[in-house]
Image: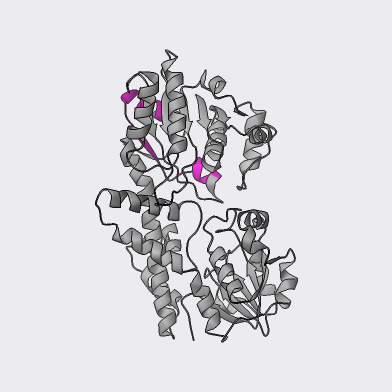
Amino acid sequence: MNITIIGTGYVGLVSGVCLASRGHNVTCVDINLEIVEKLNKGEVTIYEKDLKSLLKKTLLENKFRATTDLGQALQSASIVIIAVGTPSLDNGLIDLSYIKKVSQTLGRYIGSTNRFITVIVKSTVIPGTTDGLVREEIEKFSSKKIGQFGLGMNPEFLREGNAVDDFINPDRIILGYESDKTCLLLKELYKSWNVDKLYVNTRTAELIKYANNMMLATQISATNELANLAFALGGIDIMDVVKGVQLDKRWNPIINGSRTNPEILRYLIPGCGFGGSCFTKDINALKSQGKSLGVKMSVADSILDTNNDQPYQVVKILESEFKNLFKKKILILGLAFKPETDDVRESPTIKIVTDLLRKKALVSAHDPVAVENFKSTFKSISSNIDFVKDWKSKIYDSDISIITTPWSEYSFLNDIDFKGKIVIDAKRAFSSNYFKNATYRSIGWRL
């Protein structure tokens, strides 16, 4: 199939390259000429595991290309995928201005051609956007009614750092549609994927995306709240509590005498809070939409409140060891919100570092890939941080090391003698006996 994707951000580029790898002819459109030129040379514009090699492969096979010319890209497209940004507004709702503008442009084109074109929204949008705003703008600017063009919604479930594998090997595909012809085209688009596919209307597809993230965030925040209680009580390691919960067969079924250990159990491990571009943004948007409809969104409020405060728990742990942190030498290991990405959006490290600097600590930091992104995004605090490359040597010069992002590179920490040093494991990624001679502290555990 000939597919045009509008937007070469995280969702658009990963989707485009992966669809091209399955044999579709994909054209990605972006207004930024520099991005387009880089992509056509095989240079990725975002950091994502396996994306660069797959981009080069699809370019060599002539299955992928990028352009700034939307009109030309639309000429042969049977499906147009909208993958533009939907950033947060001050009221928590998402900014749909890019969606609206693209819908108007597509409406003009659809009105000028006799070809049947299906528009699929892949951007994360609040329920009712596709069959509301998008449909209305296309109908208005094309002078056609739905049925004369197709309309659908295909949410993404891509985890940063695992996005390529998530797209190529998904656990399910949600296909929202507003006409039978669109449903047939979506079936053809994902024909080569042998996986559970759920066909629903577009606003159901939109809510599934938000519901998925809210349920996961709920588990994280509930576990963190319990961890904070365990810390306050003392004499309890929250990981023992977590293990007890995880042995419930409803979380961890026993099949043929063995535990299945599903991946969902990872969301029952305490830490310094979730970050990234999705959870906070999506829950805020859902909360704001619910309240605008008169729905009390108490759970959403609680999730956000708990997560907002959670990074400061790291500093509380330190303050339980020292009366003050003045001129304490502290090394931060990890700036990205999770491993295998350079994304620092909503990273818990931001609040941890800000709080440490406020308390006059001397802060150093390391990350394998996210340093430059952190510097450009948080210029005001970056000038007060000593960014280091040789993190192993810096450990010996520091009083405290805080592991905020469990990169695989840090698995070599057990080679280091931490005598006289404190280690804070902010993501509960390691056991207490992993660090030689260290004073080990973590979320949800106090002697």
What residue is at 63 percent from the left and 26 percent from the top?
Answer: 62
Q: Quadrant of residue 319?
A: bottom right
Residue lying farthest left?
A: 294
- Residue 63, position in %: x, y? 60, 27
Applied colour scheme? one colour
The answer to whether residue 231 is above or below residue 24 is: below
**Image point (49%, 74%), residue name:** 313
Q: Position of residue 66 (x, y in %)?
A: 61, 29
Q: Residue 239: which quarter of the image?
A: bottom left
Residue lying at 63% horizontally and 67% vertically, measured from the top left: 333
Q: How many marks?
A: 0
User: Which image quadrant for residue 38?
Assistant: top right
Identified at 65% across, 62% down, the residue is 382
**Would you say residue 76 is visible in this rendering?**
no
- Coordinates of residue 416 in the picture (x, y in percent): 70, 75
Front-lying residue, 12 or 241: 12
Left or right of 299? Residue 40 is right
Residue 263 seen by the camera: yes
Above or below for 219 versus 395? above
User: Residue placed farthest to the top in the image?
Assistant: 114
| Horizontal side of residue 286 vs 431, given as left or right | left
Vertical order, 333 against 144 (above or below) = below
Q: Is residue 101 above or below residue 245?
A: above
The reply to whether the magenta stretch includes residue 254 is no
Q: Which residues are magenta?
A: 164-186
Residue 6, horizontal then vertical, whole percent: 52, 32
